[in-house]
Amino acid sequence: MRIHVVKIGSGLINDIKLLNTSLNFFCMIDGYKILIHGGGEQVDSILNMMNIQKRMIKGRRITDKKTLNVVVMTYAGMINKNIISLLQYNNCNAVGLCGADGNCIKSHIRKKNPIDYGYVGDIIKKNDVNTTFIKLLLKNHITPVLCSITHDGKGNLLNTNADSIASNISVSLSNDNCDVDLHFCFDKKGVLKNIKDPKSYFSKINFSLFQDMKKNHIISNGMIPKLENGFFALKNGISKVSIGLPNDLIDSNEKTMLCM
Amino acid sequence: MRIHVVKIGSGLINDIKLLNTSLNFFCMIDGYKILIHGGGEQVDSILNMMNIQKRMIKGRRITDKKTLNVVVMTYAGMINKNIISLLQYNNCNAVGLCGADGNCIKSHIRKKNPIDYGYVGDIIKKNDVNTTFIKLLLKNHITPVLCSITHDGKGNLLNTNADSIASNISVSLSNDNCDVDLHFCFDKKGVLKNIKDPKSYFSKINFSLFQDMKKNHIISNGMIPKLENGFFALKNGISKVSIGLPNDLIDSNEKTMLCM
């Protein structure tokens, strides 16, 4: 079973035209596919409307109970269901899920030391991803669309990084005899050498180059977890990991490929 | 295939203790089951937090674009996903759905004359409910939990009455060779003869009594659509339609039964 796992970034979701284009390209993928999304910018604007203060440390959101409610409403409600209705309109039969649905992704609340991130969960264990359920949907020609909310199995929803969901779901499906391609889509052609030049993307980044880039602060804070998740997938059986525009998702070399 | 369709009202959702009790009773139902919820009171409080004015006509919400966003966030996001995580904790493997998910419930935007309700959809056609998808989940021991959002198939989400979803899904499953029991659960023992006396419930209401009650203004505005949906189900093949507390869902006579 060959599966394309596509994660779309917040920048592609915030603008309805970009979202429509991204979904059109996603729909054009033949065969089995899974879409994963976050939507941090949308959460920021809802927090603002509700007069709840946004708190971030090292580019990650502190998720107290009130913020969790907003995160769940925005990711699993507003963004996810709008995506599903647009996919249905495009004749792609999709189902929107958070990790609690069908128990598809469990996570573990992050340790409160050294930083208490609140209701934030990490996917740690091998069986945290319920591939049986995901494959049941795929085999019935239903496309899963996962938002970046998971659950701990004890009745709590947890805020979880969407890149991490994408890489973990890819690895788990690969361990369950699937051949997975993982694509991180955002609003740039790839990982840029020069942030001011949108055409200056790396065609390839290997692990040692990535280590150098981190050491020399060549890449931005937001890009580091994406690449870490990409290399995690690569090290755990995923043969193709790419970063780029939705337009270049399939059948294009104009993107950044990760390699060992 | 015997299926219990259970709709829980806003009053049971608003209080976390009542919600937990309701879900515990729901989990105790043996065999196939479907849960349906709205959550109007929660929508009101989110609208209030976001400084969006609530507008109702004849007990029904005027749903402009901003209100639709809140309705989707609240029903399909906050309420639905919290219910799913609690059901998973209770070992009930559930999946939360809006009508766009798996194209499970289509609806048709309500005519703008005489009242323009905005993004409100009604289930009208026989094949608006996708019973194939619902049955796929049930057969795989996954409990569908539907919120009161549907879609028009053209990329629009629509606000839809939860009682109407419950009765329509019951009728469609019944037409697809299922034996369905329909339960409307709320925070009273049944339809009350005297609104001030919580024990004064009707054991039975037949259609002619219902017509009299409407004519003589004995029942409240909120109860009329519930009963209309109940009688619609009864007239279309559902043999058991009950209204009462979650505690009396199964194996209890302390509730109101509808009969022809």
Image (cartoon, coloured by chain):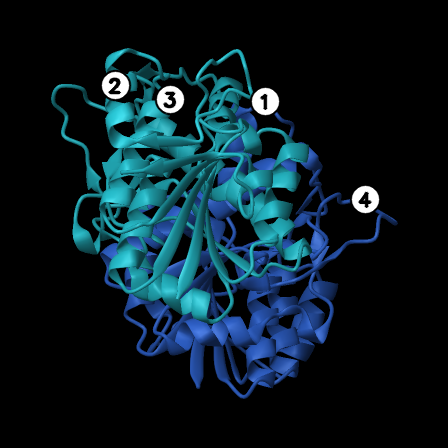
Chain colours: A blue, B cyan
- Can marks 1 and 4 be said to lie on one chain? yes
C-alpha gap between disc 1 and disc 4:
22 Å
Q: Residue furthest right?
A: A113
- Is the residue under label 4 in contact with that under label 1 (CB below 8 Å)? no
Q: Which numbered disc, 2 or 1, marks the residue closer to the eye?
A: 2
Q: Which residue is mark 4?
A: A116
Q: Secondary structure at mark 1?
A: loop
Labels 1, 3: one chain: no
Cα separation between marks 1 and 3? 33 Å
Mark 3 element type:
loop
Whether labels 2 and 1 share one chain: no
- Gap between marks 3 and 4 measured at Cα: 45 Å
Disc 3 to disc 2, how far (Cα)?
Answer: 17 Å
Confirm whether residue A188 shows in the render. Answer: no
- Residue at label 3? B222
Check disc 2 and report the residue beneath it: B212
**Front in this rendered view, residue B153 or B19:** B19
Q: Position of residue B187 (x, y in %)?
A: 55, 28
Q: Chain of mark 4?
A: A
- Quarter containing the N terminus of chain A: bottom left
Residue depicted at 25% across the width and 40% down the height: B232
Of badges 2 and 4, nearer the viewer stands 2
Q: Is residue B156 left or right of residue B195?
A: left
- Which numbered marker is on residue A51? 1
Query: Which badge, 3 or 2, is on the more N-terminal residue?
Result: 2
Instruction: Look at label 1 and name its amino acid.
Output: Asn
User: What secondary structure is marked by label 2?
Assistant: helix
Dot 2: few (<14), some (14–19), or many (≥20) neighbours within 10 Å? few
Q: Residue at x 70, y 64 (%)?
A: A214
